[in-house]
């Protein structure tokens, strides 16, 4: 399986996990921007960037890649808050390794 397909699969798994916790979610088509998923539960909205590594890989490298892109994710959240003030738009990074996912709020 290519890295691209693996990443898409992990994005869907994260979305399904969020769905089980009351979020309505959708995958961003192409996901070449600062976030891969948009998840909403009431007035709480998350812009989610998923970084995945295969089992045996280094999740710290995925986390570092996510931190490098965190400022773009924060900027996107600020822009969405201006347009849709009824939602919080929290920037969230999810690092996935195998079947484990770690969620990080990168709003600061």
Image (cartoon, grey):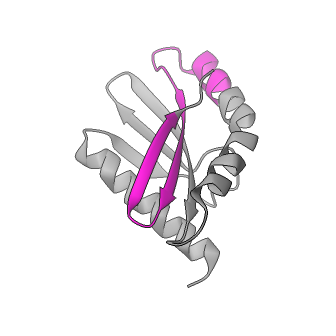
Asked whether residue 100 is drawn in magenta, I would say yes
Name the residue at the bottom extreme. Answer: 1
> To which quarter of the image does residue 22 belong?
top left
- Specify whether 26 is left or right of 61: left
Q: Residue 10: horizontal and vertical position, in percent? A: 47, 63
- Residue at horizontal 46 percent and vertical 41 percent from the top: 103
23 vs 29: above or below: above
- Residue at horizontal 37 percent and vertical 21 percent from the top: 43
Compare residues 71 and 41 and report the one nearer the observer.
Answer: 71
Compare residues 57 and 12 and report the one nearer the observer.
Answer: 57
How many marks the image carries: the answer is 0
- Residue at horizontal 59 percent and vertical 24 percent from the top: 107
Q: Residue 84: horizontal and vertical position, in percent? A: 54, 20
Residue 69 shows up from this direction: no
- Specify whether 30 is left or right of 95: right
Asked whether residue 79 is drawn in magenta, I would say yes
Q: Residue 25: horizontal and vertical position, in percent? A: 39, 46
Figure quadrant of the C terminus = top right
Magenta segment boundaries in residue numbering: 77-104
56 vs 51: above or below: below
> To which quarter of the image does residue 79 belong?
top right
- Specify whether 11 is left or right of 4: left
- Residue at horizontal 33 percent and vertical 45 percent from the top: 18
Figure quadrant of the N terminus = bottom right
Q: Residue 80: horizontal and vertical position, in percent? A: 61, 26
> To which quarter of the image does residue 82 belong?
top right
Compare residues 82 and 53 and report the one nearer the observer.
Answer: 53
38 vs 98: above or below: above
Residue 38 shows up from this direction: yes
């Amino acid at each position: 399986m290519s890295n691209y397909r693996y990443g898409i699969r992990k994005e869907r798994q994260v979305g399904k996990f969020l769905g089980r916790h009351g979020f309505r979610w959708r995958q961003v088509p192409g996901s070449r921007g600062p976030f891969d998923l948009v998840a909403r539960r009431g007035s709480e909205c998350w812009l989610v960037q998923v970084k995945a590594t295969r089992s045996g890989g280094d999740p710290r490298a995925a986390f570092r890649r996510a931190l490098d892109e965190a400022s773009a994710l924060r900027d996107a959240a600020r822009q969405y808050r201006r347009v849709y003030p009824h939602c919080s738009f929290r920037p969230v990074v999810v690092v996935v390794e195998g079947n484990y996912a770690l969620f990080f709020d990168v709003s600061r």
